[in-house]
Amino acid sequence: MSVATRAYLDHNATTPVRPEVVQAMLRALELTGNPSSVHAEGRAARSAIETARVAVAGLVGAKAANVVFTGGGTEANATILSPGLMDCDGGRDCVRTPASLLLHSATEHACVRDGHRFPSQATEAIPVDAEGIVDTAWLAARLERFAAEHTGARALVSVHLANNETGVIQPVAEIATIAKRFGALLHSDAVQAAGKIAIDIEALGVDVLTLSAHKLGGPKGVGAIVFRTGALELADKPLRGGGQERGWRAGTENVPGIVGFGIAAGLATQALAQEGARLAALRDRLEAGLPALAPQSVVFGRGAPRLPNTSAFATPGLSAETTLIKLDLAGVALSSGSACSSGKVKRSHVLTAMGVDPVMSAGALRASLGWTTCEQEIDLFLAAYAKALAAIPDRSARAAA
């Protein structure tokens, strides 16, 4: 076995593309036809897309007809989080009521918090507890008040299935029950959860969830909107033109990217239980090593259900920015949280919402594991982290750590 010289522990930012995905995409690049064309070449491209659609649907227990491909998770979220989203309830003559209030969890990814299309006065953040779990009592009370004050109006609730920084898993099925009680629609950003835990869109009860290929071994720039039923409609689709993707997303489909997404989804589905257990063991190995190096280290969200691959932690005396540089020079790739901040290291809004002390938050790091991660990489990280701790200039701070 070769010795690992670098440890890539930033899979929540993006996961290395699987070899099987690369090979499938190379073959797809040779498909000549436009998937909207009726000739043989076009039908071959269309067939490749529909095969991938089945695989992506299978990843979350959905019907293939309810999968819409997009240019990524951010586009998928921005499309759905719109005041124009309506539930037709399956009837031709139904009354369509657009959503007029967006309630999202305080720990959502930036593409939900800032990427939605609701006016600011029609948006509110749902608070979370110290572990990062949504306050369901607050949500129920807010929806009840909204229903009482706005007869016939509809709210849209958006709560991610799992947090990208802490890995904390939200009680989405419970939230769905609350939303349904007050006639609200429910969206869940499942980008980080897909391929790491089992997802059944029917059991969750969400109206729609969103996915991204590059978080589970697929290519960047491909995502999906997945509906539980075919009842949802959107009055203001952001990309209009041709009738691709059932009219939800105009533009010629990215055939190689979609094919890659399908292969990655299929591989993730097949290996879900075994890979989840393997990653949980590696994560536990990492977290067991932290207090041995620094007893005052804290793992955020540890008291809540978490993804098996994610650990967010901090040690007093270490700043995130300096530590990330030191770890990188030592051959370890980590993150301070979301990778969607243009390389900036700043205090996490997730930890702020959880009430974490600003000093600890400033030193927060995230290790996220994936299909390439092995025990050697965990050991390489722990050795590099030990050196970072030894370099703390203040002796009293080092002793405290």
Image (tube, rainbow, N blue to C red):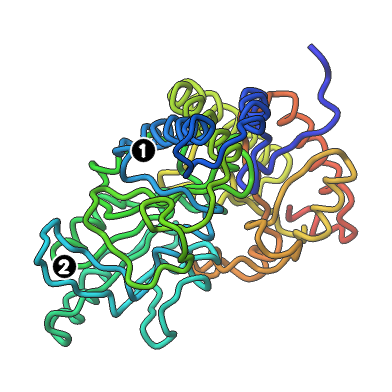
The residue identified by callout 1 is 60
Q: Is residue 144 above or below residue 161?
A: below
Q: Secondary structure at mark 1?
A: loop
Residue at (78% x, 53% y) in the render? 399
| Viewer-proximal residue among 149 and 20 | 20
The residue identified by callout 2 is 183
Residue furthest toward the front? 39
Left or right, 310 with respect to 363, comes to: left
Place residue 23 in its image quadrant: top right
Left or right, 275 with respect to 314, comes to: left
| Viewer-proximal residue among 303 and 128 | 128
Query: Can residue 127 be seen here?
Result: no
Residue at (61% x, 31% y) in the render? 31
In whole angstroms, how far apart are the C-alphas of marks 1 and 2? 24 Å
Mark 1 or mark 2, earlier in chain: 1
Residue 307, position in %: x, y? 48, 41
Q: Residues within 10 Å of mark 2 (few under 14, many from 20)?
A: some
Query: Disc 2 marks which amino acid?
Result: Gly
Residue 41, position in %: x, y? 54, 32
Number of numbered discs on residues: 2
Q: Quarter of the image containing the N terminus?
A: top right
Residue furthest toward the top? 1
| Viewer-proximal residue among 222 and 327 | 222
Query: Disc 1 marks which amino acid?
Result: Val
Q: Is residue 62 above or below residue 229?
A: above
